[in-house]
Amino acid sequence: MRETATRRPGLTQELIVDTAIGLADEGGLDAMTMRGVGQRLGATGMALYRHVVNRERLVELMIDRVAGEYAYPEPRPAHWRDALEAVAWQDWRSFHAHPWMLAATATARPPLGPNLIANMEWALASFDGLRLEPREQLYLLGVVTSHGHGLGMVWLGGEVVPDVRATTGWWRERLSESDACPRLNALATALGPEIDVHQEFEFGLARILDGIELHLGRR
C-alpha cells in the first residue's frame, strides 16, 4: 500500500507547519512539540511523522514558512542603502510577529530552505555594482542583520511578545530606589513611561548604514 493511502484525511504538511507556528507564537519554541501539535490537530504522533520526519525538520519548515511570509520586497530598491534597510526591517518585523525565530535562526548553520535561500540571494544582490570582495559583502550584511537580531534578543528573548511598558516600569522602579545613579534616573525620566523599541531599531540601523556609506566612500 502506498504511503499516501494511510495518511489521515485532511492532515497535510502545510497544516502541521501552520499549527506548529501557532504553538510557538503562543509559548515559544520549546512549547512546540510533536505531541502538542498532534493534540491540537487531534492526530497521533505516527500520523504526523508520515508528513514530517521529526521535530527538527518541522522547525526547519517553520523557519522557511516565515521567511516566505516576510520575503524581501520586489522590485528591489535600486540603491544599496534602501535595499539593506528593507532587509533589516523585514527581519525585524518577522521577529516581532514570531519571536521564536530569534532562537531558531541563531546559528552559523541555519536551515537553508528555498525561501530563506531566496532572501539571502536578494540581500547579497544589494551589493551589485559596488565592487566589493565576497568576504566584505558577507561581513557588511552580517552587521546589518545582526543589529535586528541582537536588539530582538534583548526585547524578545523570552520568545513571546513582551510587555514593553512592564519592562520599562521594572527599570524605573529599581532606578528610583538609589541616588547613586543620577544619570540613569534622568535618562529613565526623559524616556517616559514606555520605550519605543521600533524607534530604537530605526536609529541604530541608520547609524549602521551611515557607517557602511563611510566605508564605501573611503574605498
Image (cartoon, rainbow, N blue to C red):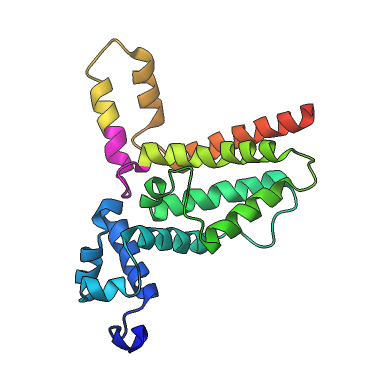
Which of these two is toward me, 201 or 173? 201
Q: Is residue 161 magenta?
A: yes
> Is residue 37 depicted above or below 208 in this figure?
below
Which of these two is toward me, 49 or 62? 49
Question: Total label count?
Answer: 0
Is residue 144 shown left or right of residue 101?
A: right
At x 21%, y 65%, the residue is 35
Q: Quadrant of residue 134?
A: top right
Is residue 98 shown left or right of residue 177?
A: right
Q: Is residue 22 magenta?
A: no
> Is residue 57 depicted above or below 150 in this figure?
below
At x 59%, y 50%, the residue is 87
Q: Residue furthest top?
A: 180
> Is residue 99 depicted above or below 147 in this figure?
below
> Magenta stretch?
156-169
Is residue 131 shown left or right of residue 41?
A: right
Please say whether residue 28 is visible from this viewpoint.
no
Q: Quadrant of residue 204?
A: top right
At x 32%, y 63%, the residue is 54
Q: Quadrant of the C terminus?
A: top right
> Is residue 43 depicted above or below 191 in this figure?
below
Which of these two is toward me, 11 or 197? 11
Residue 160 x %, y %: 31, 50
Residue 8 x %, y %: 28, 83
Is residue 7 shown left or right of residue 80?
A: left
Residue 50 x %, y %: 32, 75
Residue 158 x %, y %: 30, 43
Q: Quadrant of the N terminus?
A: bottom left
Please say whether residue 141 is visible from this viewpoint.
yes
